[in-house]
Amino acid sequence: MEKSELLAKYSRLTDFLKQDPDNSNLFQDCFELAIQLGEHQDASALLASREEKYSSDPLQIYCHSKLAIAEQNFQRAIELCNQLIANNIDNLAIRYNLNWAEYCLGNYERVVANIKQIGNAKQEYLPFLILEARTLHHLGKVEEATFLTRHTLEIQPQMVEAQGLLSMLLLDSEHYSEARELAAAALRVNSANHESLITLTTLALNEQDAELAKSYLSNNPKITLKSGRLLLNLGQAQMLDMEFDQAEQTLTQASEVMGQHIGTWHALAWVKLVLNKIDEAGECFQRAYDLDRNFAESHGGLAVIAIHQNRIEEAEKLTKTSLRLDPLCASGRYAESLLVERRGNHEEATSKLEHLIKSSKTPQGLPILDVVERVTKKLRNKADDTEK
């Protein structure tokens, strides 16, 4: 149903509710539509209109929990759901809201344990299967998540959420053709499907097509601003288009939404390097390093920073560590070429750079060629100035 149709329906139902304010079914229909339309103030007003008479009513508490989720007050939602369950008001919808709130807080192990306790009853409420698959994906169990999502689509082949999620799972396991087909199918039904947007923008970035990636996101600005992965993809598209100032702003937003994602800090660091914000770039690489000290790209990035800051001995150690962790590490091999350049062997350094650009596995969408050329040029100019 189009938004205009939903608005018209909402207007009709609210008129009916004014004439019959104690009609619980009518109230719930109005409330659910307000949430669906993103009209949180209207939803809150609907609840307030019934609060004095129905404050302890299970439906009132349940709707408060849904509004809390919509407003991203997940801890409050958990408290309200647990209040209902403690009073023996328990059903799959309440359990789903409880576990969705736990999921949004990153309590993935707890969600998996809770859903297992529900057992086969989850088959009666397909969103539970999707939530379980999403949670397994976050825990790195891609095969299990893929199997569960395919099972969901066997039950309901046209379920858009399942199509979008499966497209992203297939993207992560490099089954690009099927991922693209599923994402496109989901977007034809719901142009704002989050996982499908992630899939299609990532595939566009893999093909170095910044314009296509941006076109998907420009149609869904509200979703993009709320999604760390979509902000990351937008920032990388801006990098591909050499819009480094805009990319810095976008990737900074991404890091605020998705501060535990190492790749976001790496992308932001490279942008800051291009913009000659060396200290800030170093801070970004350090944030990535603090998240996982065994990640090769972080060591390599810190090596590049050390070279910029003329800490050559430290740069050599960091470069060795990065290449020991991953011999194909792009940032480590780049740092290695810069160190060769520092020793005065320009020809060998150029050869290493060319090989790096042709053969390295680089982060999706990261325009390593342009970044390498720009940063190398800055270092050479800096070296020339020092010699003068």
Image (tube, rainbow, N blue to C red):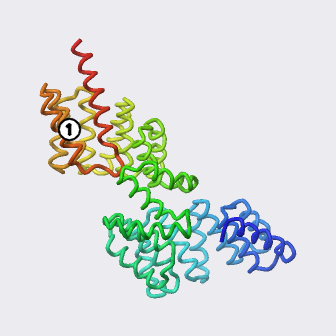
Q: Where's residue 106, x and y in %?
A: 44, 62
- Residue located at (58% from left, 77% from top): 94
Q: Is residue 293 above or below residue 340?
A: below
Horizontal side of 19 relative to 206 (left or right) equals right
**Whole-percent x and y of residue 296?**
23, 48
| Residue 2 vertical position relative to residue 289 in the rendered view, above or below | below
Name the amino acid type tagged 1.
Answer: Leu
Q: Residues within 10 Å of mark 1 (few under 14, many from 20)?
A: many
Residue 84 lies, with reference to residue 11, above or below; the image says below
Given the current orientation, which residue lies at the most extreme top position?
388
Q: Quadrant of residue 48?
A: bottom right
Quadrant in which the N terminus appears: bottom right
Say above or below: 306 vs 39: above
Judged left or right of residue 351, residue 388 is right
Where is residue 54? Give x, y as percent.
76, 74
What residue is pinned by disc 1? Answer: 353
